[in-house]
Amino acid sequence: MNLSVGDNWEKWYPNKRGATVRIIEKSGREWTAEVELARGEPENPATWEEIYKKFYVNATSLISGKEATALGDVIMNLEDHSVDSLTKAPLMSRTV
Protein backbone atom coordinates (compact mmCIF):
# COMPACT_ATOMS: atom_id res chain seq x y z
CA MET A 1 0.00 0.00 0.00
CA ASN A 2 1.26 3.46 -0.90
CA LEU A 3 0.03 6.72 0.55
CA SER A 4 0.99 10.10 -0.85
CA VAL A 5 -0.16 13.71 -1.00
CA GLY A 6 -1.52 14.46 -4.43
CA ASP A 7 -0.55 17.71 -6.09
CA ASN A 8 -4.18 18.23 -7.10
CA TRP A 9 -5.47 18.23 -3.52
CA GLU A 10 -2.53 20.09 -2.06
CA LYS A 11 -3.16 23.12 -4.29
CA TRP A 12 -6.82 23.30 -3.16
CA TYR A 13 -6.10 22.96 0.58
CA PRO A 14 -7.57 24.27 2.91
CA ASN A 15 -10.70 25.16 0.90
CA LYS A 16 -11.09 21.58 -0.28
CA ARG A 17 -9.81 18.73 1.83
CA GLY A 18 -10.44 15.90 -0.54
CA ALA A 19 -8.94 12.56 -1.28
CA THR A 20 -8.50 10.22 -4.20
CA VAL A 21 -8.29 6.48 -3.67
CA ARG A 22 -6.91 4.24 -6.37
CA ILE A 23 -6.92 0.47 -6.03
CA ILE A 24 -4.93 -1.61 -8.47
CA GLU A 25 -5.25 -5.40 -8.43
CA LYS A 26 -2.33 -7.65 -9.21
CA SER A 27 -4.14 -8.45 -12.45
CA GLY A 28 -4.01 -4.77 -13.41
CA ARG A 29 -7.70 -3.97 -12.90
CA GLU A 30 -8.08 -0.53 -11.39
CA TRP A 31 -10.74 1.38 -9.45
CA THR A 32 -10.69 5.03 -8.52
CA ALA A 33 -12.91 7.05 -6.20
CA GLU A 34 -12.68 10.69 -5.28
CA VAL A 35 -14.34 12.94 -2.73
CA GLU A 36 -13.83 16.71 -2.48
CA LEU A 37 -14.89 17.00 1.14
CA ALA A 38 -15.26 14.11 3.53
CA ARG A 39 -18.54 13.47 5.30
CA GLY A 40 -18.31 14.91 8.79
CA GLU A 41 -16.36 18.02 7.84
CA PRO A 42 -18.03 21.27 8.98
CA GLU A 43 -19.04 22.08 5.40
CA ASN A 44 -20.44 18.58 4.88
CA PRO A 45 -21.81 17.54 8.27
CA ALA A 46 -22.94 14.03 9.03
CA THR A 47 -26.44 13.45 10.35
CA TRP A 48 -27.03 12.09 13.85
CA GLU A 49 -28.24 8.88 12.19
CA GLU A 50 -24.96 8.52 10.27
CA ILE A 51 -22.91 9.23 13.40
CA TYR A 52 -24.90 6.67 15.40
CA LYS A 53 -24.60 4.05 12.66
CA LYS A 54 -20.82 4.52 12.56
CA PHE A 55 -20.68 4.24 16.37
CA TYR A 56 -22.83 1.10 16.33
CA VAL A 57 -20.78 -0.67 13.65
CA ASN A 58 -17.55 0.06 15.51
CA ALA A 59 -18.96 -0.72 18.97
CA THR A 60 -20.35 -4.10 17.94
CA SER A 61 -16.85 -5.22 17.04
CA LEU A 62 -16.23 -5.20 20.83
CA ILE A 63 -19.61 -5.59 22.52
CA SER A 64 -23.00 -7.12 21.74
CA GLY A 65 -25.66 -5.29 19.78
CA LYS A 66 -27.77 -4.98 22.93
CA GLU A 67 -24.86 -3.44 24.85
CA ALA A 68 -24.01 -1.11 21.96
CA THR A 69 -27.62 0.08 21.79
CA ALA A 70 -27.67 0.77 25.54
CA LEU A 71 -24.34 2.60 25.44
CA GLY A 72 -25.36 4.50 22.31
CA ASP A 73 -28.55 5.66 24.02
CA VAL A 74 -26.55 7.09 26.91
CA ILE A 75 -24.00 8.77 24.62
CA MET A 76 -26.55 10.23 22.18
CA ASN A 77 -28.68 11.58 25.05
CA LEU A 78 -26.05 12.69 27.55
CA GLU A 79 -28.18 15.62 28.65
CA ASP A 80 -30.77 13.13 29.95
CA HIS A 81 -28.28 10.89 31.79
CA SER A 82 -25.93 11.21 34.72
CA VAL A 83 -22.20 10.68 34.46
CA ASP A 84 -22.81 7.67 36.67
CA SER A 85 -24.99 6.06 33.97
CA LEU A 86 -22.20 6.53 31.43
CA THR A 87 -19.54 4.97 33.66
CA LYS A 88 -21.84 2.05 34.42
CA ALA A 89 -22.60 1.44 30.73
CA PRO A 90 -21.68 -2.04 29.42
CA LEU A 91 -18.36 -1.13 27.83
CA MET A 92 -17.12 0.72 30.91
CA SER A 93 -17.58 -2.32 33.13
CA ARG A 94 -15.41 -4.57 30.95
CA THR A 95 -11.70 -5.10 31.20
CA VAL A 96 -10.22 -4.53 27.76
Image (cartoon, rainbow, N blue to C red):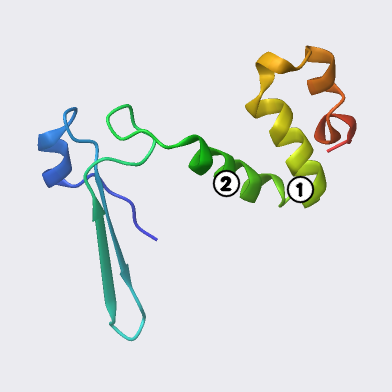
Measuring from the top left, give residue 78's x and y in whole percent: 68, 19
Q: Note whether 17 is above or below 34 in the view shown.
A: above
In this rendering, the answer to whether 28 lies above or below 33 is below
| Quadrant where the C terminus is found in the figure | top right
Report which quarter residue 21 is drawn in: bottom left
Residue 38: x and y in percent read 32, 41
Quick check: 19 left or right of 50?
Answer: left
Which quadrant, please, contains the N terminus? bottom left
**Helix or strand or loop: what does disc 1 sit on?**
loop
What residue appears at the point 81 percent right and 35 percent down from the top-left corner?
Answer: 91
Q: Locate residue 72 relative to residue 86 in the image: left or right.
A: left
Check disc 1 and give the amino acid type.
Leu
Residue furthest to the front: 80
The residue sitting at 34% across, 32% down in the picture is 41
Cβ atoms at labels 2 and 1 below 8 Å apart: no
Q: Residues within 10 Å of mark 1 (few under 14, many from 20)?
A: few
Nearest the viewer among 84 and 12 is 84
Task: Read off the residue under disc 1.
Answer: 62
Say the numbered circle drawn on residue 53: 2
Q: Residue at x 16, y 37 (%)?
A: 10
Q: Residue at x 19, y 47 (%)?
A: 6
Quarter assignment of residue 89: top right
**Viewer-proximal residue among 59 and 17:** 59
- Place residue 13 in its image quadrant: top left
Side of 33 relative to 74 (left or right): left
Callout 2 amino acid: Lys
